[in-house]
């Protein structure tokens, strides 16, 4: 009865409790439902989101590394063929990418994709490369000379951990892109043409003397210019292998006799045999003793220089083989040599001698390759400053004739055909082929001065001292804005840089002070204007390498004792080449060091 | 219902409520702590990842191993952390394979770039230890997250 009553009519408190219990149960069930169907999926979704974000971050860094490797390879490659350079860049970039990892998984299995639409399999990474025009940012075909920016796109197939629970099926690609390349660059090359730039030319030091009927030729010394004269000075010799020779510089152990030299052409030797030299000639076969001889062809005519015949070199260099009459007047024994005098011998000798000049020949070739590679690889404007005693101040400056010979007035003393300084006027000013064309885009040879600097560097000769301060001042003047007293020839937004190439130490200054201190002062100005001075030192004499390093190094930025590269800062570096084969590498590393990620 | 029964029922209901509240509170605590864990771990990993990539990038701009190590360390100092929950990212070690500066003696093999590898790690203290993306547990309840990046050396030293 009581039970029944309770069943029918529960007391109010009991009813309230029952209601609460039901609510409590409902809340518990609700919590369980929320936990299973809302909180848990949300947590898992968050985890997946975090994984995705992390994968994206990591992939971004890996792609950046990959793009930088590609750009650095392009910049430092010695290949002037764009297609080979670009293929090498892709291969190097893939190698770099494979060294990284993503979400603790190695990327060593990554593959190159041939299409930009990539569908990577689970945990697979695909890489797509394309080359862009730096101005239009449009893709250009492989091999194009306008392909100066490399774009790398990577796609990774992310598989969510809780895919099946969350109802996600398949692979979710994580895609990242990076562009690598050289920045827009305004670069001035300061090129050393001091006398020492031909110190490693193979020469013969000769006393041309009066014989019974014909001239006689006594060989005083042979070998490369610096060693043949037994020079020991750190700045090389002021004497040159080709004209103007500055023969009376009297560097080394031998002395020159202008009296014994006499008239350069059309006359026999005036003096008897002595220990003084009258001529220095280049062994145009490249050997120490001219043992191989040479056949030189100029405009279809072949000129014979018999092996070991130094007299033939001497007379050709003096212009005494230009005709039979001149040769007879000059008492040249050409019959016994088995050669026939004819117009062009002098030019033939000179052409061959120019090819044998060291290290200036290699330096010219390396700088031309540098211009070519930079022109292929980036949006660049070139400037060229050549320096000896002074700095070139016009596009076709000529060197003065030999001191002391100007009155002799013969062929060897007339240097009018040889330029000592040459660079384009306003080297950094863009020159559009058509005034109607806007200066942007500013690419191509017509804008970059590539043609001008390449042509200007070719005929350079070695002559004079090493005026590094003057050269740096001239380069800075071009790069600095007008507000800071410069000519303001650099482009807005361009990265500015100076490359200083020298084979010696500062010996002259445009500022009248100590040449080294003045050069360092210019490096300070470069530093204040954010312009790095990359230094390439060529030093083939081992005992001098430490002295050159001290002045050009990037290890010390002390303004009074540091190196020019170190003082200029802004990422500048010093590269030292100790033999001629390393020059190209040094120039390539300059290009490499300005590589960066670009937008 | 007898008085005793009523009293027992009351106690039983109160107990049930307590249990429900306790279980709910427990789950809420667990979820909150896991949330905090996730937040800390994500923050720590992101910090370490960013520090490692900055360090590798800076090291790649140097021309010698010593300078690269120095540059990497100074980059890591920029990426600060609270020090208790997340420790400052540090170089895992100065030697291979954690730190590698390989310029191939200026003669890298074909299609290979000189490179620098930098490995950094950070320790993340979690209220509740959970396994997360390859991170390893430490004894004091913290997890250690390690990251390694390899970058191409851009400024190659060249003294022929």
Image (cartoon, helix red, strand yellow):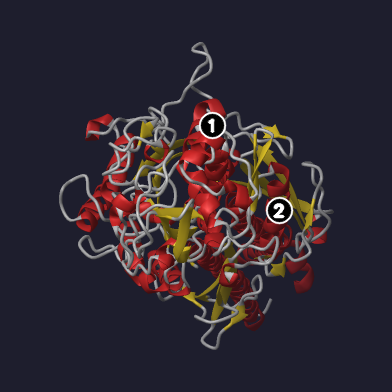
Q: Nearer the viewer, residue A386 or A168?
A: A386
* In the image, farthest residue toward the bottom: B139
Crowd class of label 1 (few under 14; some 14 to 19; many from 20; radius 10 Å): some
Select label 1 or label 2 by which is in front. 1
**Residue at 82% from the left image edge and 48% from the top image edge:** A119
Q: Residue at x 43, y 37 (%)?
A: A418
Residue holding disc 2: A88
Q: Report, in whole angstroms, how far the alpha carbon at label 1 lies from the one at label 2.
A: 26 Å
The reply to whether discs 1 and 2 touch (Cβ–Cβ < 8 Å) is no
Residue at the limit of the structure toward the front, as seen here: A212
Q: Position of residue B54 (x, y in %)?
A: 48, 61
Q: Is residue A381 above or below residue A270?
A: above
Look at the image and tell me in which quarter the N terminus of chain B lies: bottom right
* Chain at tag 1: A
Q: Secondary structure at mark 2?
A: helix
Q: Position of residue A79 (x, y in %)?
A: 66, 49
């Amino acid at each position: 009865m009581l039970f029944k009553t309770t069943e029918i009519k529960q007391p109010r408190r009991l009813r309230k409790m029952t209601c609460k219990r039901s609510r409590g149960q409902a809340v518990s069930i609700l919590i369980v439902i929320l936990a299973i169907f809302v909180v848990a999926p949300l947590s898992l979704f968050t985890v997946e989101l975090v994984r995705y974000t992390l994968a994206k971050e990591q992939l971004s860094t890996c792609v950046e590394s990959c793009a930088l490797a590609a750009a650095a390879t392009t910049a430092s490659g010695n290949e002037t063929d764009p297609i080979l350079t670009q293929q090498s860049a892709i291969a190097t970039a893939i190698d770099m990418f494979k060294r990284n990892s993503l979400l603790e998984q190695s990327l060593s299995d990554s593959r190159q994709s041939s299409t930009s639409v990539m569908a990577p399999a689970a945990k697979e990474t695909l890489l797509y490369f394309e080359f862009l025009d730096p101005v239009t940012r449009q893709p250009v075909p492989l091999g194009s000379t306008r392909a100066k920016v490399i774009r790398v796109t990577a796609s990774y197939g992310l598989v969510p951990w809780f895919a099946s629970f969350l109802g996600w099926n398949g692979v979710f690609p994580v895609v990242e892109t990076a562009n690598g390349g050289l920045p827009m660059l305004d670069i001035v090359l300061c090129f050393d043409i001091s006398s020492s730039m031909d110190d490693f030319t193979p020469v013969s030091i000769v006393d041309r003397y009066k014989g019974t009927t014909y001239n006689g030729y006594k060989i005083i010394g042979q070998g490369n210019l610096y060693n043949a004269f037994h020079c020991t000075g750190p700045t090389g010799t002021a004497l040159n292998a080709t004209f103007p020779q500055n023969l009376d510089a009297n560097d080394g152990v031998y002395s020159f006799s202008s009296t014994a030299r006499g008239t350069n052409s059309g006359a026999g030797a005036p003096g008897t045999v002595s220990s003084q030299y009258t001529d220095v000639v280049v062994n145009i076969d490249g050997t120490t003793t001219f043992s191989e001889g040479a056949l030189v062809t100029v405009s279809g005519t072949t000129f014979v220089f018999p092996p070991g015949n130094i007299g033939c070199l001497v007379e050709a260099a003096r212009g005494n083989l230009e005709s039979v009459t001149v040769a007879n007047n000059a008492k040249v024994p050409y019959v016994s040599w088995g050669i026939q005098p004819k117009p062009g011998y002098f030019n033939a000798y000179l052409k061959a001698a120019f090819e044998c000049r060291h290290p200036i020949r290699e330096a010219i070739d390396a700088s031309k390759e540098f211009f070519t590679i930079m022109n292929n690889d980036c949006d660049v404007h070139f400037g060229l400053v050549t320096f000896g005693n002074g700095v070139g101040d016009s596009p076709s400056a000529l060197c003065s004739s030999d001191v002391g010979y100007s009155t002799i007035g013969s062929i060897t003393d007339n240097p009018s055909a040889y330029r000592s300084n040459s660079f384009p006027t306003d080297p950094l000013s863009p020159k559009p082929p058509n005034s109607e064309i806007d200066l942007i885009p500013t690419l191509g040879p017509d804008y970059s001065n590539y043609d001008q600097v390449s042509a200007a560097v070719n005929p350079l000769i070695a002559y004079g001292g090493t005026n590094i301060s003057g050269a740096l001042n001239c380069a800075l003047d071009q790069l600095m804005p007008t507000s800071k007293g410069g000519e303001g020839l650099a482009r807005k937004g361009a990265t500015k840089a100076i490359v200083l190439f020298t084979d010696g130490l500062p010996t002259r200054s445009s500022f009248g002070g100590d040449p080294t201190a003045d050069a360092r002062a210019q490096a300070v100005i470069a530093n204040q204007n954010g312009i790095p001075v990359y230094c390439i030192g060529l030093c083939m004499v081992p005992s001098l390498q430490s002295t050159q390093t001290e002045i050009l190094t990037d290890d010390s930025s002390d303004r009074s004792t540091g190196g020019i590269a170190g003082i200029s800062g802004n990422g500048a570096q010093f590269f030292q080449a100790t033999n001629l084969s390393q020059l190209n590498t040094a120039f390539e590393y300059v290009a490499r060091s300005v590589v960066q990620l670009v937008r | 219902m007898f008085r005793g029964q009523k009293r027992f029922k009351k106690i039983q209901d109160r107990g049930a409520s307590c249990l429900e509240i306790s279980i709910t509170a427990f789950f809420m605590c667990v979820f909150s702590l896991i949330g905090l864990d996730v937040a800390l771990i994500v923050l720590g990993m992101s910090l370490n990842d960013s520090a490692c990539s900055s360090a590798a990038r800076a090291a790649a701009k140097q021309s010698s191993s010593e300078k690269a190590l120095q540059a990497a360390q100074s980059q890591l100092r920029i990426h600060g952390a609270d020090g208790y929950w997340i420790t400052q990212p540090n170089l895992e070690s100065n030697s291979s394979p954690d730190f590698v500066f390989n310029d191939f003696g200026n003669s890298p093999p074909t299609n290979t770039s000189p490179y620098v590898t930098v490995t950094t790690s950070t320790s993340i203290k979690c209220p509740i230890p959970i396994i997360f993306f390859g991170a390893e547990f430490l004894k004091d309840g913290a997890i250690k997250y390690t990251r390694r990046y390899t970058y191409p050396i851009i400024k190659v030293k060249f003294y022929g």
